[in-house]
Image (spheres, grey):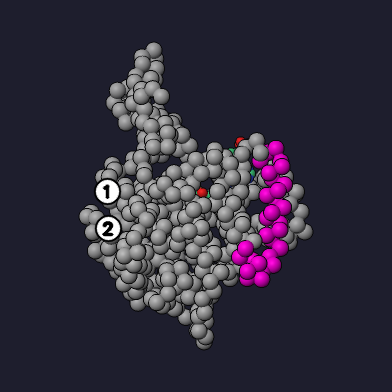
Amino acid sequence: MSKIATLTIDGKSYEFPVVVGTENEVAIDIKSLRGVTGGVTTLDPGYKNTGSCESAITFLNGEEGILRYRGYSIEELAEKADFLEVAYLLIFGELPTKEQLDKFHNDIKAQSQVDEDIKKILDGFPKAAHPMGVMSALTSALIAFNPTSVNVDSEEEMYQAIVRIMGKFPVLTAWTYRKRAGLPLDYGDDSLGYVDNFLKMMFKKPNGEYTSNKTVVNALDKLLILHADHEQNCSTSTVRMVGSSHAGLFASLSAGINALWGPLHGGANQAVIEMLEAIKSDGGDTHKFMNKAKDKEDPFRLMGFGHRVYKNFDPRAKIIKKSADDVLSALGVQDPILDIAKGLEKEALEDSYFVDRKLYPNVDFYSGIIYRAMGIPVEMFTPMFSLGRLPGWIAQWREMRLKKEPIGRPRQVYIGENLRSFKPVDKR
Ligand code: SDX
């Protein structure tokens, strides 16, 4: 592989270094482009061909359907690790020893109290408020109650901010759900594991004891691992962009929550269930909805299908699909929309429109079916995605800050009016 790329503009040639990553990804380093060419930039809407950074956290190969966190395959981590271990791996770069993991969990537990005044902010929202809007507001509000987590420059200050948000985010997520459900807020139990404690905060009945359901705990632990990071996706790029101005960690995460909310991104897991329900109530005719998805005049898209990077099966979708069968049978849940989903997948994978465009089920296609079987309402699906993605956002923010990356500030190509003079209103 040549270490130099040559660009010729107006007959003049310019050379740029070629960067090759540890998995042989090749990039042209154009840091000097504007300077050496007198102002020429690149244009790449949606950054489909543009690398924003060098990162050592997550590796994706979209053509082969590979996903690895810090070099470990998603298949192995989903099967053998637990979510807190994976969070530690993503953030600090190595799988923790037992002592490191226990300290991390204890430091998180020590930070899992939320200021009682946060409840006043939560009470200010109407019950019908979308939980993602509530969560981005509460995450931002944490800044006011944790001022030492705002300007974090040292690794120690970052660590304290990290365990603080890892401790408080599950509480805020569970409280957001219980507020909507009209249930009293529950504080959890420090003797439980991270995921088990979250489920207790979500589902403990005010007039009953909480009993852990191992199937549900293990299924949610796996789902959170599968959602934990995904290199430079829309919401992670947002967290990096906001963090690059040295806004604090909580402010950056709040922005990431809002980016994930969109139906083209994390909001798709909610949109998938709404789509499958629509197909079911319409008589289960998947073919009609397939035609809508292929009709360019129709804005309808097959939610949970397609991906910017994966042009093969999303490896997470494969694992979640299998887990859906296991969890529903373990819970004795019959959900007709699982069969509709499988039918839709089969039909799409035999349809040239989807095959030609390499549109396969993504992480959002089956996840909602498991959340629903666990008793999680559809409007809480994207907050569950946020809970899983939290360590990935933190890891990417920390890497960007520790590498002292410059503030993000893309250029543009101006296509507006050329210089013109102001006309008084009576002359227009
Ligand atoms: C996530 O980036 C990440 O890593 C994200 C994520 C993560 O972990 O962070 O993986 C999580 O966001 C998963 C994606 C969830 N979104 C959805 O399921 C929404 C439905 N999918 C699409 O909207 C779409 O596939 C995207 C947004 C996911 C990707 O869009 P791209 O890469 O910009 O692709 P495109 O819109 O240019 O589509 C290429 C072609 C177009 O047709 P043509 O113009 O070539 O004729 O494929 C078509 C599109 O119309 N197409 C679809 C489709 N997705 C793409 N047609 C019907 N249904 C779809 N779902």
User: Marks 1 and 2: in contact by CB < 8 Å?
Assistant: yes
Answer with left or right where residue 250 lies relative to residue 77.
left
Give percent across and percent down for residue 295.
Answer: 69, 42
Q: Is residue 205 above or below residue 127?
A: below
In the picture, the quarter occupied by the N terminus is top left
Residue bounds of the magenta highlight: 326-354
Q: Which mark is residue 164?
A: none
Which sits earlier in the primary sequence, circle 2 or circle 1? 2
Query: Which sits in the foreground, 336 or 419?
Result: 336
Q: Residue at x 49, y 63 (%)?
A: 221
Residue 379 picture quarter:
bottom right
Quadrant into which the C terminus falls: top left
Q: Can you see residue 242?
A: no
Ligand 1 is in which quadrant of the figure? top right
Outermost residue to the bottom: 207
Q: Is residue 126 magenta?
A: no
Q: Nearer the viewer, residue 341 or 383?
A: 341
Q: Badge 2 is on which residue?
A: 158
Residue under label 1, please give it. 402
Q: Position of residue 57 (x, y in %)?
A: 38, 47
Amino acid on which the number 2 mark rests in the picture: Met
Q: Which residue: 36% across, 24% down?
A: 3
